[in-house]
Image (spheres, rainbow, N blue to C red):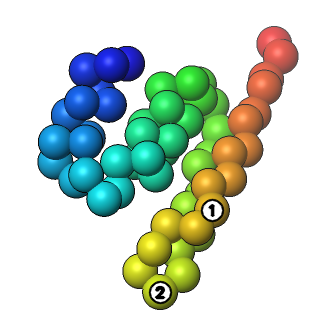
């Protein structure tokens, strides 16, 4: 994941931590939903809903 962290920091140093958190959530999630909440143009909340299905 170090490569992604460096790339994000390079592209958007002020947004690096929120973008890293979003990227990590996407990488870990197999099935589900990620919801971002934005207030006045800033990411303030990240919600992850994971679905587990049994067959």
The residue positioned farthest toward the left in the image shown: 11
Q: Position of residue 33 (x, y in %)?
A: 62, 46
Q: Earlier in the sequence, mark 2 or mark 1?
A: 2
Identify the element where label 2 is drawn.
loop
The residue positioned farthest toward the front in the image shown: 14
- Judging depth in this view, the residue of 31 and 2 nearest the camera is 2
Quote the CA–CA distance across marks 2 and 1: 13 Å
What residue sits right under mark 1 in the picture? 45
- Judging depth in this view, the residue of 20 and 47 nearest the camera is 20
- Image-based side of 16 in relation to 3, left or right: right
The residue positioned farthest toward the top in the image shown: 55
Residue 4 visible (yes or no)? yes
**x 25%, y 52%: residue:** 13
Rendering quarter of residue 4: top left
Residue 26 visible (yes or no)? no
Identify the element where label 1 is drawn.
strand
> If the image is split into quadrants, where does the N terminus sit?
top left
- Image-based side of 51 in relation to 8, left or right: right
Determine contact: label 2, label 1, CB under 8 Å: no
**x 31%, y 59%: residue:** 14
Q: Position of residue 9 (x, y in %)?
A: 25, 42
What residue sits right under mark 2 in the picture? 40
**x 58%, y 67%: residue:** 44
52 to 40, vertically: above or below: above
> If the image is split into quadrants, where does the C terminus sit?
top right
The residue positioned farthest toward the bottom in the image shown: 40
| Residue neighbourhood size for the residue with mark 2, other residues' Cα within 10 Å, grouped as few (<14), some (14–19), many (≥20) | few
- Judging depth in this view, the residue of 23 and 2 nearest the camera is 2
Q: Position of residue 2 (x, y in %)?
A: 33, 19
């Amino acid at each position: 994941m170090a490569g992604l962290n460096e790339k994000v920091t390079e592209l958007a140093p002020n947004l690096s931590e929120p973008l890293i958190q979003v990227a990590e959530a996407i990488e870990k999630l197999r099935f589900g939903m990620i919801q971002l909440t934005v207030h006045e143009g800033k990411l303030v909340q990240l919600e992850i809903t994971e679905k587990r299905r049994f067959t």
